[in-house]
Amino acid sequence: MKLVTGAEMKEVDRYSIEEIGISGLVLMENAGKEVAQAIIEFLGDLKDKQVIILAGKGNNGGDGFVISRLLIEHGIGVKTILLGKKEDTSEDAKVNLEILDKLGIEVQEIISKEETLALKGTLDKADLIVDALLGTGIKGELRGLYPKLITLVNNSPTSVIAVDIPSGVEADTGRVADIAIEAQETITFALPKIGTILYPGADFVGDLKVVDIGIPQMVIDKQDFKIDLITSELVNKLLPIRAADSHKGSYGKLLLVAGSTGMTGAATLATQASLRIGAGLVTLGTPRSLNPILENKLTEAMTYPLGESKEGVLSRESVIEIKRLLNDRDVLAIGPGLTANDEISYILNHLLEKTDKPMVVDADGLNVISDLNILKGRGAPTILTPHPGELSRLINKSIEIIRDNPIEVAKNFARDYNVTLVLKGARTIIATPQGQIYINHTGNSGLATGGSGDVLTGLISGLLVQGIDEVSATIIGVYLHGLAADLAAEDLTEYSLLPSDIIDYLPQSLKAVRSDK
């Protein structure tokens, strides 16, 4: 499913109106009708229900006027409030405002602080508030009476449904400069806006529903949108069917280089995850002294003892053994639990420069890349999976800059260094060298614990080794990783979720996705 900015959605509207000839008033009527229906479903028993419509002066307010009329037709008590003067409303909004006037439906103008504050009792006693104040065009801090009114709404016990996007949330980024409507539901039109998916905006949205308002699919298909929301349907489509006559060689040979003294858990989790997602043969290369421990922990994988320093960390000489092992392997995953020092830096950078096998680089592998330009020259696919802190060190920019502009930062990095970038977070972002962006919405706070990233490394590399292309492998891996965590949290709670639980619940997540076929 495509995600759009406010400007992109405006262009879709413009094209539908000016090039196709669909009236803006028709789109507004359809939008109002869809929201009205959602409100009726939300309210259930309509008897004696009271709804407050808070309308702004733009087209979002025009939607509110349509909603007001349609709810009244269903016998619902409605009070319509315009923040501003009627004469200042947009052209299409004014048409629907005049319809209300001709029907004898009162619209109250609010133009002062005193009038705004006087709404408290009205808001508190209603059964529902409809936020039709601001649309997708706002950026930065709210001005005028909006902050005061939104504060009243948020402090009210009354539930809120937002029209298109909660007022105060930036459509392009999800930023909230100062305050925004806290909705229980948001009914958005045609396509989800980026700001309804990314945090902090997602915190204000509640349940998001995408509704059709009559924009032709051809118009949407004509646009060159670069951002996709990862859905179960997409993952289902990308997951290959395993042939009945296949064998272990059909699903690839993975070499995973991981672990150091005190960090055998990272190596274990990554290895088990790669096996659970269906990799054919997995070999874990690990410091020699740790091999007996990991042989005991990993009965389904092969292990290989590599040269080490006296601290139980891989020595630079081990790179010769790793390269030899790679001659008979299809993919290299490297990083979990390795430790970040000069020895590991030498190994990682040598392998990036001298090997032609696809690579997945995570954790300590990310922390020791000495020259990002090495990535540009690689002939084989490279996947990097940093969290914002690791990416901050890689590009020498603050975590705040990355968190404020995650899509732009990820897109630029992937393009500039010819990698598929998985920027991990509450909304993990995948960026490709071609400029395509995928945003994941599965997962929960139970993933905020050490080891979750190691599981993701195992999933992505285990998919990649099966011959799935690098972008598809990251999409599938990231989505299933989050979905398994969601399913596990239903039984275990987010507090008690362990990284190993993600592996245990992976079969359920695969079944859930496959059930959509």
Image (cartoon, rainbow, N blue to C red):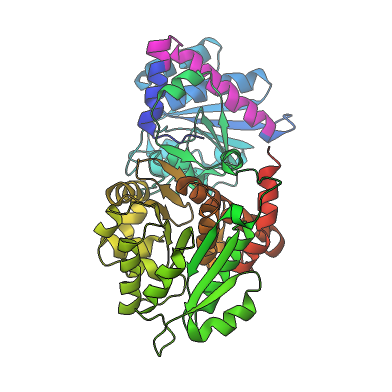
The image position of residue 207, as x and y in percent, is 59, 42
The image position of residue 146, as x and y in percent, is 39, 39
Q: Is residue 141 visible?
A: yes
Q: Is residue 91 left or right of residue 34?
A: left
The image position of residue 253, as x and y in percent, is 54, 60
Task: State the quadrant of the C terminus.
Answer: top right
Task: Identify which residue is drawn at 75% across, 32% down.
Answer: 45
Task: Identify which residue is drawn at 38% across, 52% down.
Answer: 380
Queried whether the magenta region covers residue 26, the answer comes back as yes
In the image shown, does 123 or 304 lie closer to the viewer?
304
Up the image or down, 138 lies above or below 293; here it is: above
The dominant secondary structure in magenta is helix
Up the image or down, 377 lies above or below 502; here it is: above
The image position of residue 514, as x and y in percent, is 68, 43
In the image, which residues are magenta? 16-41
Up the image or down, 92 lies above or below 238; here it is: above
Q: Is residue 290 left or right of residue 341?
A: right
Quadrant in the rendering for residue 358: bottom left
Number of marks in the rendered image? 0
Task: Identify which residue is drawn at 64% across, 37% down.
Answer: 127
In the image shown, does 253 or 373 lie closer to the viewer?
253
Task: Identify which residue is drawn at 55% across, 56% down.
Answer: 252
Q: Is residue 335 visible?
A: no
